[in-house]
Image (cartoon, helix red, strand yellow):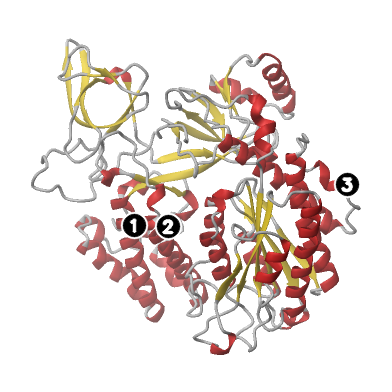
Amino acid sequence: MTPRTLLLSLTAALPMAFAATPAMSDARPLLQEGKQTLYQRVLTTPGCRLAEHSGGTGGEVQPAFSRFYVYQRSEQNGERWLEVGPDSYGSASGWLPESCTVDWKMQLTLSFTNPANRDRLMFFGERDGLMTVFDDFEPSSQVAPLRAQLRRDGSAPGIVAQEPEYFVDLQEQFYLLPILEGEEIMTEAGFMTRLLRVASVSEAEQGEAPQAPDDVAAQLREFNAGVVFVIDSTISMGPYIERTREAVERIYQRIEAQDLADQVSFGLVSYRDSVDAAPGIDYVTRMYADPGDVEDGSDFITRVADLHEAPAPTVGWEEDAYAGMMQAIDEVEWSNFGARYVVLITDASAIEGDSERSSTGLDADQIRLEAARQGIAVYTLHLKTPGGEQRGDHAVAESQYRNLSTFSGTGTSLYYPVATGDVALFGQRVDALAAAITDQVRSAYLGEEAIGSALHAEEEPEDASQQRMMDDLDMIGHAMRLAYLGQATGSQAPPVFEAWISDRDLIAQHVPTTEVRVLLTKGQLSDLSDVVSNILDAANAGLISPSDMFERLRSVAAAMGADPNQVQQSEAQRLGELGLMGEYLDDLPYQSEVLNLDEETWLSWDGLQQERFIRRLATKLRHYRRYNEDVDRWVSLAEGADPRDDVYPVPLEMMP
């Protein structure tokens, strides 16, 4: 059972999304100062008691960082009190002393990145302690003694806590790291870094203790891997299909010889293009082998025996690679595997999400995020064949697949081109990948300390590109092991109440330590989808008559109840000033392409620039719909709260 974690984010109070039913109270929480829709909200600090009335004594102690909306404020005997409730729908439940609460204003929270390629994040008790590190041109001189003392004594001066040794996966164990305040600085080493004051509390379920370190070796004996090849099987891919089959057959022989049949499983998905556009190609995607069902090497070979190149040509050179990826991501039960890999093999770029031939409506950004949600590392072997070069396809494909193959845990792009589409070189890459993954699992099974130590037992790679691939796989394998051990041992975020951290590694200051998420309620996500849809409609119309776009949006804003004075301003203005977007987006610390777009800029763009803007916005809209349907990841932040105040942690990059 996953430990219950009470880490609540200091985010903005969320607006009412639905009208109250007649049976509910008409009471609503107090609004934040200067806001029309954002309610006041607080979190409790340890020991806070919920009293029956203002100034009351006794009452039940609330879990630290419980979320409450503020309905009234009063003062009793010189002490300020708050009437609070668990949601924004009229269910006030008692009174809290203001002194034991913290205002909840910013709608941002942090999650840890996988620490495979960086040191564990340290929580500093004071800002000055963190600044001492960044004011040093050689920060290692400040950091090394602290880490040495932490390893030796378990504590160090000025350090409140450390990030867990093993990765805490937000998808597996929901937690939030609240931001109390933050600032951006330039370090002495020349990097832009954010200093963040954060707060957190984690609490395991009663009677449930974290697994003892002595059990780690035993846990690693259960570590396994699932590998799914996603192969372009259009008419030009015959030799590569056969060589992939051969590679998997070889590696299965090796797996069975090493008695690892239960530890490594392979699957295969084939993809082509739109059947409507080219009926003779038979299918868009097909799962030939699910790694969860494959029994052994001979079973795999039997299942993929019918895989051949398409009997007819497709419409264009680009194919529906994203459809093949999504079948592998959605239809494999990835939770059965500790290490999770997809290997995309193609000689062509992917059909973009806004094309009529796209069966997913998604682009590389969205596929990458979907893979990350499952903890999947995506490797791309891009065959740079003469056919692709003649059609000018290589640059497009490389851009797509570098993005798609960026592993969110480390920021590493697992994209590997194969020059001229050389079949022999391709075979070496596939053999090396399959063997390295198998050796990683074997290394963990045997208890070897370095997850990739067995990788170098084979012959050295013949070229620098293959060496890079092996080094990357070494690091990704380590990240997979950290994630697996984090889940297996019940790793939790540190029980810190307040501290200072950096969003970049203290020494390798280009490496991020955290990722930003925005919490949205169902109502907010619905409103956001409606607004983006309206902007898309106006933008599409604007392609025909560019000067009409902002006029149409002013009409939409008026119909949606925006401030009339704001809407009727005749000067060129940003989309964000039209009153279309919710106030919960106002204070997000990022540069929004949509909110910052003004009429003058739109009119200055050529048709291609406008189409790219529309395409990016359309793919985000399709992703919002996926979030809405992802019922397992909507989270309640307060016991007894109305489900309409449940939230979804949306990656910052998916905001408009």
Q: Position of residue 384 (x, y in %)?
A: 75, 73
Q: Which residue is mark 1?
A: 528
Q: Nearer the viewer, mark 1 or mark 3?
A: 3
Secondary structure beneath dot 1 equals helix
Specify which label sits upstream in the sequence, 3 or 2.
Answer: 3
Q: Position of residue 344 (x, y in %)?
A: 66, 65
Taking the image as shown, residue 55 lies to the left or right of residue 189, namely left
Separation of marks 1 and 3 at Cα, in angstroms = 53 Å
Residue drawn at point x = 47 percent, y = 35 percent? 1
Q: Which residue is mark 3?
A: 457
Report the front residue among 510 and 290: 290
Q: Which residue is mark 2?
A: 656
Q: Position of residue 591 (x, y in %)?
A: 48, 51
Report the front residue among 288 and 101: 288
Report the front residue among 228 and 175: 228
**Mark 2 nearby-residue class (10 Å; few <14, some 14–19, many ≥20):** some
Residue type, label 2: Pro
Discs 1, 2 touching: Cβ within 8 Å: yes
Residue drawn at point x = 78 percent, y = 48 percent? 439
Residue type, label 1: Leu
**Mark 3 nearby-residue class (10 Å; few <14, some 14–19, many ≥20):** few
